[in-house]
Image (cartoon, rainbow, N blue to C red):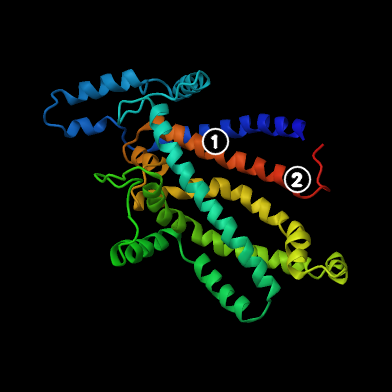
Amino acid sequence: MATYIIRRLLGLIPTLFVITVIVFILMHLMPGNAFLALTQNPHIKDAAEVIKRKEAEAGLNLPLWQQYVNWVVNLLHGNLGTSYQYDEPVARLIGFSLPNTLTLAITAEIIVLLAGIPMGLLQASRVNKAFDVSTSFFAVLLYSIPSFVFALFLIYIFSFTLNWLPSFGTVTPAVPWSGDLGDRISHLILPALALALPSIAFYSRLTRGNTLQVIVQDFVRTARSKGLRDSRVLFRHVLRNAIIPIITQFGFDIGGLFSGAVLIEEIFTWPGMGELTVSANLNRDYPVILATTLIFAVTVLIGNLVADILLAIADPRIRYN
């Protein structure tokens, strides 16, 4: 297993190389750059000369291949560059935004696992009964609605109508309890739910289908014939075999929820990677765009690796040579 993990980690290098090359080229094909806004500032004389000087300082006057090589060399030295928009090190901006996105994505994934898998198991244990039919209908309904629509509904119901939960930011400003644990949790609930609801529906359907395939197998009938309780059979014997495809999906979701938080963060004014990425793209902030894209790509690739490792743990028959 250790050899396999090392080999997979080394295999990430060419994949990341291809991703960064594609993003680098596409990024420079976009019209304009971060310094063209200076032409709209009436207080700056000779704006064209100022833009030319700033582009030279940022290395944008160099050939494209040389810009990419310089970026890779700086990256290998731990330097992600300086933001054109904020005039701050990109690493500092990411260091502020990344924890917020991780908190949101991890919370959403926990909600998905705690709600989706048990619901799917209960549906399979009561197949074609009232509970199964009703929850399956709502699961399909939830899965067909985008997360940003849930975000708007949640804000309208719990923030504007009931006034139970805040609708923006990570803390409540100008109050004595600002920033404490309860305040942060109250701000986290709505965006995490909006991000998790479609995945809860998908996980419940996936768990239900896998459970129905396993529950009719011989070893399950043998376990029941020994007098084991249905709950023990379901969670001890059926779930371990039905969970294997779910683990694979979990690996994809690690990156999917992370990148899917972009729009949710914009709606809830959540100061994470999403807000930083959208702002960087609107302002052609090339160093930030490259850094955020690299982080999103690494998250997806690591998610796939985590899924492979969990599969080997869950199923002793899987061996990586």
Classify residue 310 as left or right of residue 279: right
Left or right of 119 on screen, residue 63: left
Label 1 sits on residue: 19
**Residue at 25 percent of width and 32 percent of height:** 36
Along the line of sight, which residue is nearer the eye, 255 or 131?
131
Quadrant (top left/top right/bottom left/bottom right) for the N terminus? top right
- The percent position of residue 270, horizontal first and vertical second, equals 36, 46
Would you place residue 308 above or below residue 150 in this image?
above
Mark 2 crowdedness (10 Å alpha carbons): few <14, some 14-19, many ≥20: few
Q: Position of residue 280 (x, y in %)?
A: 36, 37
Residue that appears at 51% across and 40% down: 296
Camera-side mark, 2 or 1:
2
Of the residues shown, which amino acid type is indicated by label 1? Ile
Q: Residues within 10 Å of mark 1 (few under 14, many from 20)?
A: some
Residue at the outermost front position = 176
Residue assigned mark 2: 313
State whether residue 49 is above or below residue 170.
above
Marks counted in the figure total 2
Which SS class for mark 2?
helix
| Picture quadrant of residue 156 | bottom left
Distance between mark 2 and mark 1 Cα atoms = 30 Å
Camera-nearest residue between 185 and 38: 185
314 on left or right of 257: right
Which quarter shows the C terminus? top right
Give the quarter of the image for residue 19: top right
Asked whether residue 28 is in view, the answer is no
Q: Earlier in the sequence, mark 2 or mark 1?
A: 1
Q: Residue at x 32, y 19 (%)?
A: 56
- For mark 1, give the secondary structure: helix
**Which mark, by number, is residue 216?**
none
Residue kind at label 2, given as amino acid type:
Ile
**Relative to 103, is 8 above or below?**
above
